[in-house]
């Protein structure tokens, strides 16, 4: 379901989150969903980078010299994602139909 309450039917079986994301309006028409250029979604490295979706720096980047800022970014991004995953887990506990 998108911010406009549009329901996306993926089909039976499992689909990777990144492939589902790419079919959603928020990925296909981001200007409808993001008011500011500084607005973005947080993803893991399976998601494609875009102007509104960021993910951690790769190990190749982190092996280069002077990557302290990139490493700190990854630590903070990981912390934010853990909090989000924990919140999703709590919602799933409360609403078993989401399992």
Image (cartoon, rainbow, N blue to C red):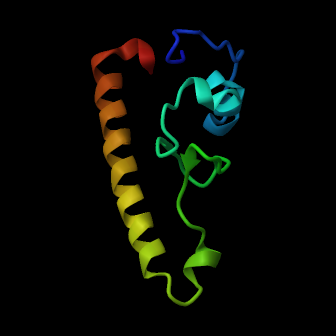
Quadrant housing the N terminus: top right
> Image quadrant of residue 52?
top right
> Image quadrant of residue 61?
bottom right
Q: Image check: 68 left or right of 19?
A: left
Q: Residue at x 65, y 39 (%)?
A: 18
Residue that protrudes farthest toward the front in the picture = 36
Q: From this viewpoint, is residue 45 visible?
A: yes
Relative to 33, residue 61 above or below: below
Relative to 54, residue 58 above or below: below
x, y percent for residue 16: 66, 36
Q: How many marks?
A: 0
Quadrant housing the C terminus: top left
x, y percent for residue 84: 35, 40
Q: Please state which of residues 18 and 98 is positioned toward the viewer in this rendering.
A: 18
Relative to 82, residue 63 above or below: below
x, y percent for residue 49: 65, 51
Q: Residue at x 34, y 32 (%)?
A: 89
Q: Residue at x 55, y 54 (%)?
A: 55
Residue that protrudes farthest toward the bottom in the picture = 65
Q: Please state which of residues 74 and 10 is positioned toward the viewer in this rendering.
A: 74
Q: Image check: 98 left or right of 37?
A: left
Q: From this viewpoint, is residue 15 visible?
A: no
Q: Image check: 5 left or right of 21?
A: left
x, y percent for residue 63: 58, 84
Relative to 54, residue 14 above or below: above
């Amino acid at each position: 379901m998108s911010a406009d309450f549009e329901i996306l039917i993926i089909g039976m079986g499992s689909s990777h989150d990144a492939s589902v994301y790419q079919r959603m309006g928020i990925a296909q028409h981001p200007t409808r969903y993001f008011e500011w250029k500084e607005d973005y979604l947080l993803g893991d490295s399976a998601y494609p980078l875009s102007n509104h979706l960021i993910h951690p720096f790769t190990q190749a980047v982190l092996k280069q010299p002077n990557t302290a800022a990139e490493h700190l970014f990854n630590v903070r991004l990981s912390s934010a994602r853990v909090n989000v995953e924990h919140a999703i887990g709590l919602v799933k506990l409360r609403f078993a139909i989401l399992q």
